[in-house]
Image (tube, grey):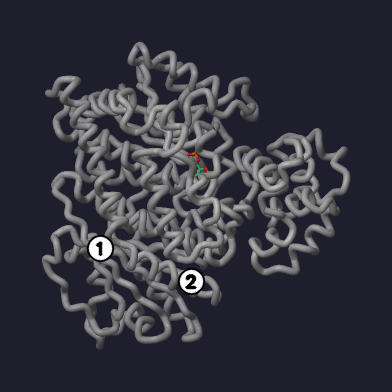
Amino acid sequence: PYTEAANKITDDIDVCDVAGIFEKLKQCDFEMFEPKGQQQYFFQTLFHDDVIEAISKVANIAADIMTSQTPNAIVISGCGTSGRVAFLTARSLNKIVPGEKFRYTIAGGDKALFTSQEAPEDNRKAGVNDLIKSTIDDVKVLYIGITCGLSAPYVAGQLDYCMDNLDKFVPVIIGFNPVYLARKNPIYDWDKTFYDVVTRLERLTSQRKGFLINPVLGGEAITGSSRMKGGSITMVILQTIFTHALNGVLTSSDMTSQLECKNLLKSYQNTCRLFYESSTTTVTTLMTSATQSLKSNSSVYYVSSGGSGVLGIVDSTECIPTYGASLDDVRGFIVGGYGEFNNAEGDIGSLGKNYQIGCDDLSKLLKLRDLEHNDTILVVAKSWDDPVLNEIQVEKDLGTQLKLVAASQSNVYVVVIDTEQGKREKNMPDYVAKLFVISIDLNEELLSENLIEICSKWIFNAVSTGAHVLIGKVFRNYMVDLKVSNQKLFHRSIGIIQRFCPSVSEQEAMTYLLKSIHDVTNVDDVMHRSIKDHVLRATPKDKVVPTAIVMATTKCDVTQARQLLSKYHVIRDALSSVVTP
Ligand code: F6P
């Protein structure tokens, strides 16, 4: 699948400096709108007529629901980043569309907004239950399931349920593979695969009873890391659908409607170009600081307001499963805490520090930090009037912790995304030594909030990706030390082992993986177990895939492989010592 393919652009990202990494991330993001290489000739891309037509049709249905007086709803759903983007979209639209018509469901519930909950992604029954629960009182529902890889069982269950109940549901799937590359592996406790379900949807599209929006984006910068391009284009598509619906789409002809969608998508492409053109110094400086923080066992803290605050939290959440980061390495905070975050389950801060997301929580945390720490605090403001700037603009005498830390060892960076062409630079307090302005000239009034928000996603994604690459968490462009915590990641792991040991077959790669998961030299006793069992055993373990790669390359046993890995602090160095280029 394209979403699992390594991208040639980032083949050597692990040996690049900050400038090189920034350039590669930029090239990869540009591909969201114009994929390079073979696939653009064979598969539909974002600007393909079929994609635009589907977006415009879905916008029509959305407009209908948004304006109706009957109890109708729009449910957006997904797993991991896809579910978090679903939440972000529902949250912001409920603020402007009356009637709380937007809902989200995410595998693992609201906990999954802050921490990775990957096992529930495999649970298609939980998907159905969550959907039924959230739409119990509704007459008509527009269901938008997001699964970048066309693979998540949680979404498959919901989609199938919608297709069984077409009198109530209009099902839509957003993903980034052609249908024939949808996942064909069996789903636990079911006789259907994702492929079966999505081909059923494909048949419905000709009758306009269902919709499939699946442009190909080119491989992710870090292989399989769909939080990046996948997450961004999901935002672009959702925002295009709903902006178009809000624009009064019902009154326009098909042609006009599609043209408007195309123009909206072009605004994002334009913004992406402007963003990358004007942010090199800012982002590379931030990447360098974040790298130094992580290298010295310190933290990176993001602080923002509104949707950007959510996006900072989302980015930090993803670092744990993607890079094996600790809970403290990267954390996000939002101005106004839970009151502003506005998730369905409310304040769940009592569950632990990863669920504490307000600026007050950051202040408390910083009070406990000693001066030895070399934290990076990244404040992203969407304009000169952004409330986040008040968080750092207190009188010196009042002494917030942000100020105290700024005065100590830590690096407080303030980035203002300025769409008003330098309208004004407020007098930043002395202690904010590092002020960066990313100037973007936006003409699109209606979209501008969304366009700025997506820029903040690109900043957070680049900083966390760059820093983790620079501390050696990535080998070539693979996140080799991934947690094997669900079916998709189990299969991805087999692919990674084969990528570094091309001489081993798929079966042999799986054998090495099982040896590493179960700590055995002979897999006969574990081979018959289900993938679910393997995943349960693998989830809490460290270095499962690197251990398997060392075994597959050097033909040593599991103990020797672990011994070799223990000699290195940096996973990239360990694997470079055994894998020949
Ligand atoms: O299984 C973990 C994960 O890969 C997340 O990193 C990702 O955001 C999520 O699954 C969703 O994947 P998809 O959108 O392909 O269903």
The residue shown at (69%, 51%) is 545
**Residue 90: mark:** none
Q: Disc 2 designates what residue?
A: 299
**Residue at x-position 47% and y-position 33%:** 38
The answer to whether 528 is drawn above or below residue 203 in the figure is below
Give me the disc on residue 438.
1
Tag count in the figure? 2
Image quarter of the N terminus = top right
- In percent of width and height, residue 278 lies at 27, 60
* Residue at position x 76%, y 41% in the image: 503
Q: Residue furthest bottom?
A: 397
Q: Is residue 61 left or right of residue 328?
A: left
Q: Earlier in the sequence, mark 2 or mark 1?
A: 2
| C-alpha span from label 2 to label 1 | 24 Å
Instruction: Identify which residue, 38 or 458, lies in the foreground.
Output: 38
Identify the secondary structure beneath mark 2: loop
Q: Residue furthest top?
A: 207
* Residue that appears at 48% across and 16% down: 200
Residue 340 visible from this viewpoint: no
The one nearer the camera, 576 or 294, is 576
In the image, 389 versus 497, the foreground residue is: 497
Q: Amino acid at mark 2?
A: Ser
* Tag in front: 2 or 1: 1
Residue 137 location (% of width, % of height): 34, 27
Q: Looking at the picture, does residue 39 appear above or below residue 348?
A: above
Q: Is residue 509 left or right of residue 348?
A: right
In the rendered structure, which amino acid carries the disc numbered 1? Answer: Ile
Residue 487's image quarter?
A: top right
User: In terms of depth relative to the viewer, which is nearer, 456 or 495?
Assistant: 495
